[in-house]
Amino acid sequence: MKLDRVIAVRKDKTIYRDDDKCIKVFNEEYSKARVLNEALNHARIEETGLGIPKVLEVTMIDGKWAIIFEFIAGKTLAQLMEENPDKKDEYLERFVDLQLAVHKKSCPLLNRLKDRMSAKISETELDATIRYDLQARLRDMPKHNKVCHGDFDPSNIIIAADGSPYIFDWSHATRGNASADVACTYLLFRKNGDAEGAAKYLELFCKKSDTERQYVEKWIPLVAASLSVNMPKKEREFLLSLVNATEY
């Protein structure tokens, strides 16, 4: 196995290509449980029939955990949007259609979204009174069992040479309310400095799914608090600023 062709470097992982394989190598401090959970999530999502790269192996390389996937050649939707700004609306529409396709799937063995969010909210630096209020609001939100990606972002979608889309990075996948997943994607656009894209995305999703914007907005403070855990200071401050906001 060759690790001389780096595809991407993240805070806690490095991704390589070796011929027709994609090798995600995690840093030493990355827990075994998190690696195995990511591989398990991915394998479960494979069974839904969605277009995703297949998991080939979970192994250790030089004392570090690694997941080996099939390599998918192509460009991410984020790259295509950047290279073709005149087609951004067209790409955004395809992006929303893909997310709607995800939400149509069910996967009963995934962890519950509300359980994950509740645990994250408990870890925040927010005042105990605010955490209590957020937990109460989370409990009152409607329960669904739709597949939620948890990090649905244009950078996690590859468009192959034949035009087929592949969705990557299922480490945060859960089953729950799709509007929470939409709120997460909206916040990812905002966090990345694309307020205009965030607004267009939310409007388009609500139109295509016949979902009230106000309903998605109820999830935004809850999701913002959940996402703030382990974020860099600037991003954490931005997310926590939305916890008590009334307009987005």
Image (cartoon, rainbow, N blue to C red):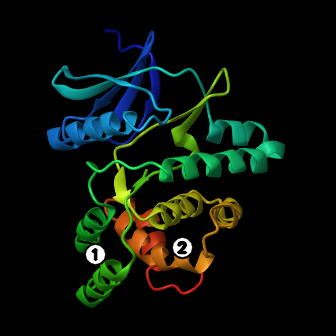
Q: Nearer the viewer, residue 216 or 9?
A: 216
Q: Residue at x 31, y 59 (%)?
A: 230
Kindly tell me whether residue 248 is visible in this rendering: no
User: Looking at the image, which is closer to me, 222 or 44?
Assistant: 44
Counting from the top left corner in percent of width and height, residue 126 is at 30, 80
Is label 1 in a helix, a strand or a loop? loop
Q: Tell me, yes or no, whether the two marked residues, 1 and 2, touch with CB atoms within 8 Å.
A: no
Q: Is residue 12 above or below residue 137?
A: above
Q: How many angstroms separate mark 1 from mark 2 (CA)?
A: 24 Å
Image-based side of 134 in relation to 94, left or right:
left
* The C terminus: image quadrant: bottom right
Q: Quadrant of residue 121?
A: bottom left
Seen at 27% across and 85% down, the residue is: 127
Q: Farthest bottom residue? A: 129
Relative vertical location of residue 73 with respect to residue 184 in this rendering, above or below: above
Q: Looking at the rendering, which quadrant does residue 67 occupy?
A: top left
Horizontal and vertical percent position of residue 45: 37, 39
Amino acid bearing label 1: Glu
Sort mark 1 into few (<14), some (14-19) or many (20+) by Cα contacts within 10 Å: few
Residue named by callout 1: 125
Helix or strand or loop: what does disc 2 sit on?
helix
Residue at screen point 40% across, 27% down = 15
Numbered label attached to residue 50: none
213, 27: nearer the viewer:
213
81 or 101, which is in the foreground? 101
Mark identifier at residue 216: 2
Q: Position of residue 218 (x, y in %)?
A: 49, 79
Disc 2 marks a residue whose amino acid type is: Val
Label 2: how many Cα within 10 Å (few below 14, some 14–19, many 20+): some
Give above or below for 53 relative to 50: above
